[in-house]
Image: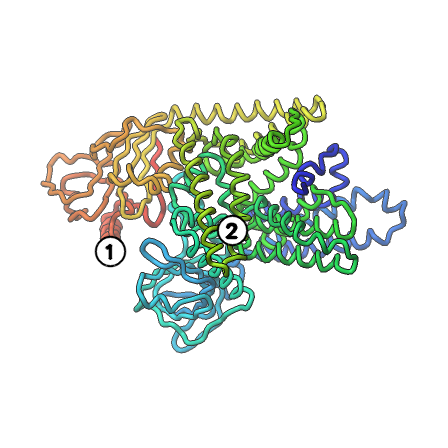
Amino acid sequence: MRLWSLLSFGMASTVYVWHRAPFIRLLIPLIAGILLQWHIQFPFTALLAAFFICLPGILLYSFFALGEKYRLAFVNGVITNLVLILLGAILVWLNDSRHVSDWLGHRYKPGCYIIATLQEPPVEKKNTYKALAQVDAICKNDLCEKASGKIILYLKKNTANNQLAYGSKIIFRQKVQAIKNSGNPGSFDYQRYCLFQGITHQVYLSVADFTLLPRRDVKTLNHFLFSSREWVLNILQKFISEQKERGLAEALLIGYKDDLDKNLIQSYSNTGVVHVIAISGLHLGLIYWLLLMLTKPLKKYKRLVWLRLTLIISSLWLFSLLAGGQPSVLRSAVMFTCLAFGETIARKTSVYNSLALSAFVLLCINPYWLWDVGFQLSYAAVLSIIVFFRPIYGWLYFPNKGIDFFWKLTAVTIAAQLFTLPISIYHFHQLPTLFLLTNIVAVPLSSIILMGEIALCILSFAEPLAYVLGHCLQWLIRAMNNYIERLDLVSFSVWKGLSITTIQTFLLLVMTAGLCFWFLEKKKLLVWISLASMVVFLGIRSASFIRSYSQKKLIVYNVPRHLAVDVIAANSYHFIGDQDLLYDEFLRNFHLQPARIQLRIQPVQQRLCDIKDFDLGTKHISIIDATSHFLPQQSKQTIDVLILSKNPKLFIPVMLKSFFIKQVIIDASVPAWKTQLWKRDCDSLPIPCYDVSQKGAYVMNL
């Protein structure tokens, strides 16, 4: 089978891999340049000048005699690496939308009109429609000037929104806001995530806030892709009746996740098979294998060989674009394109080189994909499988083909985990313990379902047959979901609350690679490298645990419309806040849990602490979230930190007749108009005032 031969290919000695995969040597300095530019931010003129100074050195080297080339090989290598580092840095600068002269952030001022074009059909959310839009122009005083930048539109639900579609142009005056992070410790960097996609602002619009312009701006390719996705969704909605199963079918075939059940996603994540839902190399590998089978008759005729290649490559890329063009899919598309091309010209390509080439191409297209979780996990999984599948598969031999097939699946699953586990723990803070049991069922079953969905789209015109096939697919998806959800109920199915830093992740990867390669090649140096990485990892981790036992903190979280405070002593905390945050798993996991995992803290009790006036070390803390009356006192009590929440009727000047207030914290549940009122009072008194909704979570260390 083609896929298994692909997995086993490339298991040569590491000595030869470096020479057989020259793109690895090009990829490393490119990545170094991308990282350097993001963290240091060199001026563009300096980067460009250095690039054009070094580039002639490489060109000049090609004209030297053979002896001179040999003597200056080291110098040429240094210059080549420097050029690639500079190329990576330049790509980062060019892909940063903030560096464009007509960027929205440079030209927009409150009160201006904005003309924008929808880049996708609006997607229905719980309370709004959401759409990505491209800014075309900014208008003021009847004068319009060209502008650029992407913004997220949140449109209030209304029947008028049905008129909006891909390519619709609207004009509005509502104030746009820069996308900001919540500022909660350990939270997801949403601002950076959006920036890497060129999105920097957002706006909420009611139906009265915008005007739909008569002209539409539709690009043929995008219109075809959106229409195709809509056609596929309509087929799945027609022939798969159950919403839960249909949501997974949509995600599995074209990566459409808006209809996915949140609890189901969590179950797939906890059991280590969330990759089944995400369109990845597994899906494209199946498509590639299917295309090879379907076009095999063309291989017999030399005149049709290039037609076969064109059909395979165009089908691969069409599916990749249809699935949303995610980095993991594009990576696979580039790699399978190289494999298909190599097979056509009768040359066996190095999988390592194809993998490095695909990464190089993708990072040249968008260097910010380097930070994409799917990109990282995809490459880690494929590299891990290529290197370790064959040795692991060789541990056991089964003459029975059925048992041997399942052992291959197990070997692939084990191999894939070796490099992906450290990255997965870093991003998701958990370790699925039953991944072998889930993958051995989910991977082949999801492959069958994917093939069945493709057949359903092809046979959709024959409705009686399509209904039967749709019912079968629904039953298979339900069976897979039930299996995953039952395993998720096992108490030890997932090890949660794991926290490692970037350095610790790197050390784990080095340790894993060292041990595995030592097992393969028996080189003592690899053992010492692995042990050294383990010692440093344990040292850093031990230091973090020691720090957690001596910590004492107060955290006022930035949770919109909610009071959320953690009072931390050593590795435990008391939670003071709204009852919703105890029972709403999404709110808790998104806003509060990252900080608790990072700080390694556990609750003292699984309920709310109703004490709102207490001492923390030498500091006196007071929380006011309801209207209270204070009588003037001759002997005033000192409040070191006053936390104001909700919408109480309270006047800070009146409170000063009863208390000495050293610091005021206004949390994210306070209405904006009252926040401004209290901030003005604090400025005039003066009392330091911290606005959580604007500055992020307030953290006080003692």
Nearest the camera: 194 or 391?
391
* SS for dot 2: helix
The outermost residue toward the left is: 631
The outermost residue toward the bottom is: 142
Q: Is residue 346 left or right of residue 194?
A: right
The residue at 74%/48% (across/down) is 80
Could you classify mark 2 by the number of other residues whose Cα lies within 10 Å: few (under 14), some (14-19), or many (20 or more)? many
Examine the rendered structure and indicate whether residue 34 appears above or below residue 154.
above
At which x and y percent is residue 623? 22, 38
Q: Quadrant of residue 701?
A: top left
Residue on which disc 1 sits: 673
Q: Look at label 2 and name its amino acid.
A: Glu
At which x and y percent is residue 530? 62, 25
Nearest the camera: 449 or 155?
449
Q: Quadrant of the C terminus?
A: top left
* SS for dot 1: helix
Q: Look at label 1 and name its amino acid.
A: Trp
Q: Quadrant of the N terminus?
A: top right
Residue on which disc 2 sits: 453
Q: Is residue 524 visible?
A: yes
The residue at 17%/48% (across/down) is 651
